[in-house]
Image: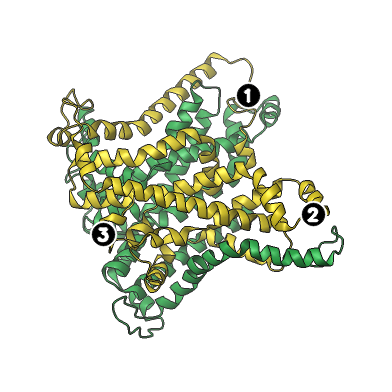
Chain colours: A green, B yellow
Amino acid sequence: MAGFPSRKARGPAEAEDALAGWVFIAPALIVLSVFIFWPIAQVFWVSLHEWSVIEPERPWRGLANYRELFQDPDFEIALRNTIWFSLGVVPVQTFLGVLLAVLANRAIPGKAFFRTAFYFPSISSSVVISVIFIWLYQQNGLINYVLRAIGFGTPQPPWLSNPKGVFQMLLESLGVDNVTPWLAGPSVALLSIMMMNIWTTMGSLMVIFLAGLQGISGDVYEAASLDGANKRQQFFQITIPLLRPVIFFVLTLGFIGTFQVFDQIFVMTPGGSPAKTTLTLGYLVYEEGFRGFAMGTASAIAVVLFGIILSIYLVQRRFIKESGVE
Amino acid sequence: MASILKRGPRAGEGPVGGARSPGERTVEIVAFAVLVFVALLMFVPFAFSVATSFKTSPEAAQLSLGNMFWPREPTLAAYETAFDSNITRWFFNSILVALIWIAGRAIMDTMAGYAFAKIEFPGRKFLFLLILGTMMVPGIVTVIPKFILLRDLNLLDSYGALTVPFLADAFGIFLMKQFFESIPRDLEEAARMDGASRYQIFRQIVLPNAIPAITALTIFSFQGSWNAFLEPVIFISGGSTDLYTLPVGLANFRAQFNTNWPVLMAIAVITTIPMAIFFVIFQRYFIASNVASGIKG
């Protein structure tokens, strides 16, 4: 280790350090190697085989699993649903997070209470939240009850069992029939899970953005208002640009998180019901691998999902570099 | 992250202080009203789940006009049913699994974080980047190879499957490295001059100073294990319900008795209470974890 000029060459101590370093990381490194590094490599390998847990034979298939995937209607459905889910949830939760943070970034009474209330859903078990929302969304549940009370209609069939596309409903009301699956949009059932996800996340996003807002010095605003900038200008020309790194961070993590949605589908709409309109890529990995015992196919889906997530991450990094924020 | 752990001195102040015009006053009131509304929106589902857990099954199924929240005849029947099932066992499993995650990570992540921060050894930078890189890899991507591996190791449907793969984690190592980098070298250097070995320094000087960081790590580990679902539900679903953790038990109960709302809500309440207590005590750390590690899916 010649690269550390600040330290005097102390032969024995350096040799001791070389060994001590490895001794200290050994336990964690063993666990991570066996249960993270190895599985990451293995998922590519499995995806190239016909791999059933039951059969001892695992014939090599090359890229056939991938080719079949792109002809599989279920994969297309799952990809479509996942994209709708992500595109619907991430921008909305991010926008609401910023909005709430801006509202809360002032002297308000009961700040600690708000922080707790907003934050609590994000640390609760996803299974608990899913069960509560199944109850809220039922035919005679609280949500329909409130909608009726304020004079709105309720979806028929009820939320989580309604396969109609939301854009399809809109277009049909305008007299447009024969909508393609992509244009139909997320089903009411998927939309219900999306709204639940937004509900779960927006409070914790508010806390992240609030931390970002409080990092902006008051001097900046004072200087701007001395220069005659009004509140609106200050918001769009100071607050938003200075929050941009945090927004990028939250968007990336949001896309990564929503692209792997699984727990909520498993609990609320098993099998991706109704009519597979809540079938997502994460759930399809489970279904192919652990219901169909097609580990090879499931691994291929997992690799595609990994590829998508990695691309989102790389695109985001590029954006950050280009916009010159760090 | 440290800047978030310490609450900023300006917290609670608006961007511009000083006298407020009547217009600004209105804006403040509207902002406050919106926040109250959203806080209620966050609170109501949990409140109803508690209320429903004290109702009878028929009452829970049909919300009645004018009396939708308070149970007409409050009853503990749902909790009795819950405790008649295996829930005590699931609760115990969740606690046991959490303790093992916490212990494993407190030891392994702390040691590794210390080495990455303070010891010069060959391969240090490369290994750290490798570990950091895995934080981007979602659990669903590796769940199949993990399943195959656990099966080959004969660990499926055992406590081993619920704990061994989680004894160390990349985020915890990252967190501990950040912490150790922030504490000065002087103490250690002095001890080294006196001839203490790395191991003595770690035990006698480093560990006692690392208690706050280890506390934070403990909280993240607890949150992670308590809410874990994807891996547990896959790794132990072939065995007996005796191995279920609370979320797996709740999901399974929902799949079997899908409209027994009071019992489902009772299990939901029992699952949530330990986390709620933990949250109230360690709120600051939770928020720091969220800010540092992002959002759950």
Q: Amino acid at mark 3?
A: Ser
Is A42 drawn above or below residue A280 in the view shown? below
Callout 2 touching callout 3 (CB < 8 Å): no
Q: Chain of mark 2?
A: B
Q: Amino acid at mark 2?
A: Arg
Evaluate whether residue B296 shows in this view: no
Task: Return the residue at label 3.
Answer: B240
User: Which secondary structure, mark 2?
Assistant: helix
Task: Return the residue at label 2.
Answer: B192
Q: Are marks 1 and 2 on the same chain?
A: yes
Evaluate whether residue A311 shows in this view: yes
Mark number displayed over residue A16:
none
Q: Amino acid at mark 1?
A: Val
Q: Earlier in the sequence, mark 1 or mark 3?
A: 1
Q: Does residue B166 appear left or right of residue A212 in this picture? A: left
Q: Chain of mark 3?
A: B
Question: Measured from the top left, where is residue A300 in percent x and y?
Answer: 39, 72
- Which image quarter: residue B123? bottom right
Question: Measured from the top left, where is residue B172 in percent x and y?
Answer: 56, 53
Instruction: Residue at 35% x, 56% y: name it.
Output: A262
| Label 2, label 3: how far apart the Cα atoms are | 53 Å
Which one is in front, A197 or B188?
B188
Instruction: Residue at 67% x, 32% y: name it.
Output: A217
User: Which secondary structure, mark 3?
Assistant: loop
Task: Return the residue at label 1.
Answer: B16
